[in-house]
Amino acid sequence: MSDILLETKALTRVFCETGERLEILKGVDFELSKNEFCVLTGASGSGKSTFLNLVGALDTPTSGEIIFNGKSLGKMNSAEKDEYHSKKVGFVFQFHHLLAEFTALENVCVPARILNPHANLKTVQEHAEELLQKVGLKDRLKHLPRELSGGERQRVAVARALMNNPDVLLADEPSGNLDEKNARMLNELFKQINEDYKQTLLVVTHDERMAEFATKRVHMQGGILVPYQDFNAKEI
Ligand SMILES: Nc1ncnc2c1ncn2[C@@H]1O[C@H](COP(=O)(O)OP(=O)(O)OP(=O)(O)O)[C@@H](O)[C@H]1O
């Protein structure tokens, strides 16, 4: 069986909503293998988030294909799409989007409660606790988001994204809002979950230190993805 988990073929995205035709992605070919830690860089406005949103099925391509585990997203029925959203991919964004009135533990439980409202609460909580331990927050289970540091909040967001055991974790500028120390801790956490737990990761970042941990680097340039070593540095 192929090791390729996620693949895009000739992926395009054109925005016309503003009256102007904006051709942002111009035929992106991309492959992500299982257990890979891929970092995607590129100039501001080059289309990195657009690409990640397509891959995460938060948006629909203008043309081209996204293939997950051999199956085209465009050919999935709505139940398969729902499963893809809730189980196959996990998302971490620049802002944590934690629920303010929920503790760290309760926030991490949310995706499992949505996926299966009848699941045994104790089992769900035990899994959430394990994940919070994994991200170094076992002493912060009962803290509300406002009682956590920015870096801790983002680590809770990582634990939440891992709650339904996604095949791939997608992260869009996860350290973009953090100071240097917390950004470094988050980078190390990604490296740890990739190495120790074989988590496949696709991370959009401007953080060169995050990129150092990657097992694969690609760069968005001129509406396509190029291998990092081939990109034209003048465009950054
Ligand atoms: N819904 C939309 N309608 C029109 N234009 C859009 C839309 N979404 C994104 N764009 C445009 O597409 C381009 C790419 O945006 P995108 O957010 O993917 O860039 P990015 O590489 O992630 O940038 P940054 O590093 O600054 O986050 C931008 O010029 C943006 O203005």
Image: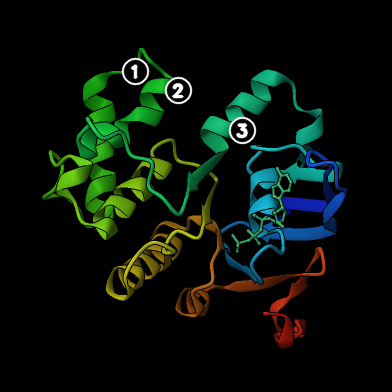
Q: Residue at x 80, y 33 (%)?
A: 74
Alpha carbon distance from label 2 to label 3:
11 Å
Q: Position of residue 150 (x, y in %)?
A: 27, 57
Query: For numbered disc 1, what is the local secondary structure?
Result: loop
Alpha carbon distance from label 2 to label 1:
9 Å
Disc 2 vs disc 1: Cβ atoms closer than 8 Å? yes
Dot 3 surroundings within 10 Å: few (below 14), some, or many (20 or more)?
some
Which image quadrant is residue 178 in?
bottom left
Q: Amino acid at mark 2?
A: Leu
Which image quadrant is residue 223 in?
bottom right
Alpha carbon distance from label 1 to label 3:
19 Å
Position of 60 compared to 14: left or right?
A: left
Q: Is residue 194 above or below residue 53?
A: below
Q: Which is more N-terminal, label 3 or label 1?
A: 3
| Residue beneath disc 3 | 84
Name the foreground residue: 195 vs 148. 148
Q: Which mark is residue 119?
A: 1
Dot 1 surroundings within 10 Å: few (below 14), some, or many (20 or more)?
few
| Residue beneath disc 2 | 115
